[in-house]
Amino acid sequence: MTFTRYAIYFAPPAKAEWSQFASQWLGWDLETGAHLALPEVPGLDLEAITAVPRRYGLHATLKPPMRLAPGTTLTDLQQACSALAAGHAPVTLDGLHLARLGRFLALRVRGTETALNALARACVTDLDAFRAPASAAELTKRRGAGLSAAQEANLLRWGYPHVMEAFRFHITLSGKLPKSDLPAVEAALQARLIPLLPQPFVIRDLALVGEDETGHFHLIHRYALTGLAAE
């Protein structure tokens, strides 16, 4: 399969009960690259609610989607991902909780995020040689949301505004919703997903993913985090 862009995700383990439900909620399986039947939730139009995040699959972005830089190859990127993962230990957090990010719903982490943020920073910096510069159209699109000075600096240096100090780990579960719809969607997730969430929540690997020509992302490979934790 030919991919147009690549990214580094945290992709939840496919066999966990919570991630199976959340993948079905979105309607896309990263592991198999296939659409999933949406669960039936009375009163909710999940087709519309999850249309935007569906093509990305269940994930949290660590290195935002990028086109490969000239002179680099997927094989080169895979080797760099392997080396990166070998230098970092698994990250253990207290758990996950449902949160509003503006008018989006997502899972956020509980517990100290120092090690998690360090891992995300390494994904951005250590793999940046593989990122083709953002086009003028991409820069304009990102600026359309309104950026702070720090986010603008990130956009110019790293190709994406929400990295480094502006990074916030999140697993997106909806598109942008009308304010009036948020309580009902929250209630459905609280009832069906939240009881399944793991405690503690452990990130054990990095997922290299690729975007196909339809805009859907597929898992290419998982790289186990095998480094030693800082003492």
Image: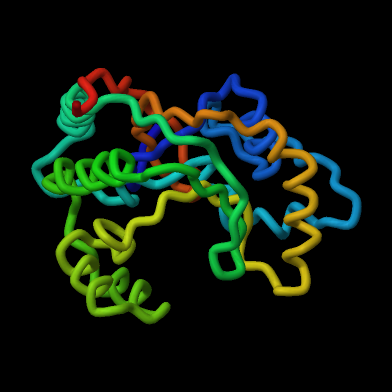
| Residue 93 pos. (x, y %) | 44, 35
**Residue 110 drawn above or below residue 230:** below
Left/right of residue 84 with respect to residue 176 in the rendered view: left
Left/right of residue 120 with respect to residue 1 in the rendered view: left
Q: Residue at x 37, y 74 (%)?
A: 141
Front in this rendered view, residue 100 or 12: 100
Residue 75 can be seen in this image: no
The furthest residue to the right: 42
**Residue 16 drawn above or below residue 126:** above
**Residue 161 drawn above or below residue 194:** below
| Residue 45 pos. (x, y %) | 80, 57
Q: Residue at x 77, y 63 (%)?
A: 183
Please identify the quarter of the rendering in which residue 196 is found.
Answer: top right
The furthest residue to the left: 71
Front in this rendered view, residue 177 or 164: 164
Front in this rendered view, residue 196 or 24: 196
